[in-house]
Image: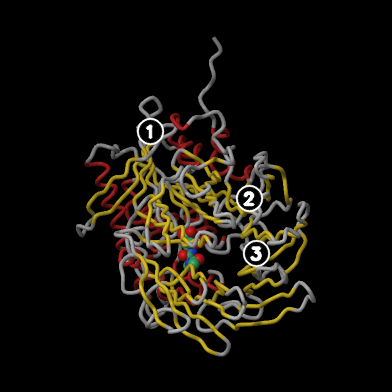
Amino acid sequence: MITFSKPTVEQFFRTYVITNFSVSNDEKKLIFSANLNGKMNLWAMDLPDTYPYLFAHHDESNSFIKIDPENRYVLAGFDKDGDENHQIYAIANEGGLPQPLITGDPSEKFFLSHLSEDGQRIYYMTSEGNPSFLNTRVRNLEDNSDEIIHVGEVSPTNLTAVSDDEKKFVYLRSFANTYVTGFVKVGNETYSLTPDPNKVHVTFEPVFVDETIYFVTDYDSEYSYVAKFDLNTKEFSQVLSIDNESINSLEWDKTNKLFYLLTENGVQDNLYKYNLSSEKLEKLSTPVDVIEKVQVVKSGSVYILGRSATIPHNIFQSADGSGWEQLTNNRVLGLSTEDMVEPDVVSYKSFDGMEIEALLFKAKPENDNGHTIFWPHGGPQASERKFFRSMFQCFLNRGYTIFAPNFRGSTGYGSSFVKLVEQDWGEGPRLDCVAAIEWLFENNITDREKLFLVGGSYGGYMALLLHGRHAEYFKAVVDIFGPSDLFTFVNSVPAHWKPIMDRWLGDPERDKERFIKDSPVTYLDGMVKPMLVIQGAKDPRVVKEESDQIVEKLTAEGREVEYLLLEDEGHGFSKKENEIRVYSRMLEFLEKHQG
Ligand SMILES: CC(=O)N[C@@H](C)C(=O)N[C@@H](C)C(=O)N[C@@H](C)C(=O)O
């Protein structure tokens, strides 16, 4: 009989990511962004035909897709090599090469906010002339006029909703990830959507429904809920909350007068349907655990993009939220879901008794190499969830067990929990990681001599910090674009992040002692284990200098450090060949240091 060899790294990394999609009003065209041909491009399906064809070729990451309601053109945002300076392009309705529409100097950003119902006016935000707070402008496609309608001030300000008559505008102003206020502008009048904008809370997902603005907020609450602002009485009131779940997105079905609500519940999402007139809330079953986008079209059909731990990104459609048809067939080359690993959701007590949830991916006995990878997630105000990562499934297949804790500061566990990392990047979350490691040993999941540490972004920062302060736990460490020095990091982030750095991380002068204590570079002497550092040269969030400096300093001390720099990537690896290069190198590095 013919026997086949074990799956290769290449097999896992030939899985594609779908980052976004949009369906035309008539549901004849579905456009999605994916790296199907190795780089990120736009692909389309002429529904009900689900065979994808190349729709727009640009080889760059996409930030949005918007189809003209009259099907004359498509708008899309692209950056350059991961620099996140997204600009707005137009594509013919039949597809082709994107042509610049609202663009400027390559260092500027242009974000789509809203396209008018008739497809004639494009509302957008730009860094041009206001890099920290952003300005809002409207481009009229009929006469090509372009005017400013709002000057951002105080903090980054985003136009988030426009009424059908284009006379009322909702703006959100961010002071932190956990402090976002909303206000509506009607003529010369401005009203706060919540009773007191000076109270710390978030406001997002505003939707105009006749004379009411529905939105999501955690105003005076631990979990975010749906609230409304009555434009006639100017009154705020609560509409709907779901016990212990944070409502995260709100999609309005205009035809059936109902909302699709997406909630974040720890490591997975739930989808609900809420009928506005009957006030009936219905929980829907979904084909995936984590949903990244929901779109409801004119007919009332609902489309979702999502993934589970063993199911890569796919797009599904349902007539009414019950029963899903899978439209894309994105799968891992030659492997079934049974060949992969579904995580266990576990929890452990941290140093102060706080309960921390975590995902434990156990290597299958036939693959198990006895080693564990400890993975602190990025963000930090994000979480590790039940979503497919080709890197995880590949490493599991090679025999590594993976442990990913949702340390304090992670999202999905209420507003107070997520705030615990603010102005405390290096103490509480680090001790949660240390408690997790001890828990792995105590429960015989991991052998003391067989632990690796791998993390990206904030997870890379945590990997560096844990390495510097607790090197005894690890055999070797992989840092993927992690901040290495909080003093240099705080000054090098994108301009529109700067106004929120104080609440998020702190002030380098006021908090000098803490910045020193929590900066990985303070602990160079402790970084004695072999290390691999990976960085995208165009990363605008954690700039190349953050990795350069730690590599230079450790090399000067004679430590064992490998450095992989990718010239055409930013904060992530969007190009297939780069992804394969990065993860093959990581695997080689781990195998070399198994001992
Ligand atoms: C709204 C927003 O973008 N806020 C940013 C300050 C933010 O939280 N960004 C994170 C998603 C991020 O990029 N963090 C880096 C450091 C990481 O990936 O960990």
Q: CA–CA distance between discs 1 and 3?
A: 39 Å
**In which quadrant of the rendered view does residue 100 lie?**
bottom right
Q: What residue is shown at x 35% (from left), y 44% (from top)?
A: 403
Q: What residue is shown at x 56% (from left), y 44% (from top)?
A: 582
Q: Is residue 78 left or right of residue 433?
A: right
In-front residue for pair 288/259: 259
**In which quadrant of the rendered view does residue 121 lie?**
bottom right
24, above or below 105, in the image: above
**Quadrant position of the N terminus in the picture:** top right
Q: Is residue 433 left or right of residue 304?
A: left
Q: CA–CA distance between discs 2 and 3?
A: 17 Å
Q: Which residue is mark 3?
A: 86
C-beta proximity under 8 Å, tags 1 and 3: no
- From where the camera sits, is residue 255 visible? yes
Check the image and tell me how it is coloured.
secondary structure
Amino acid type at circle 1 is: Ala
Label 1 near ligand 1 (CB < 8 Å): no
Q: Position of residue 456 (x, y in %)?
A: 47, 53
C-beta proximity under 8 Å, tags 2 and 1: no
- For numbered disc 3, what is the local secondary structure? loop
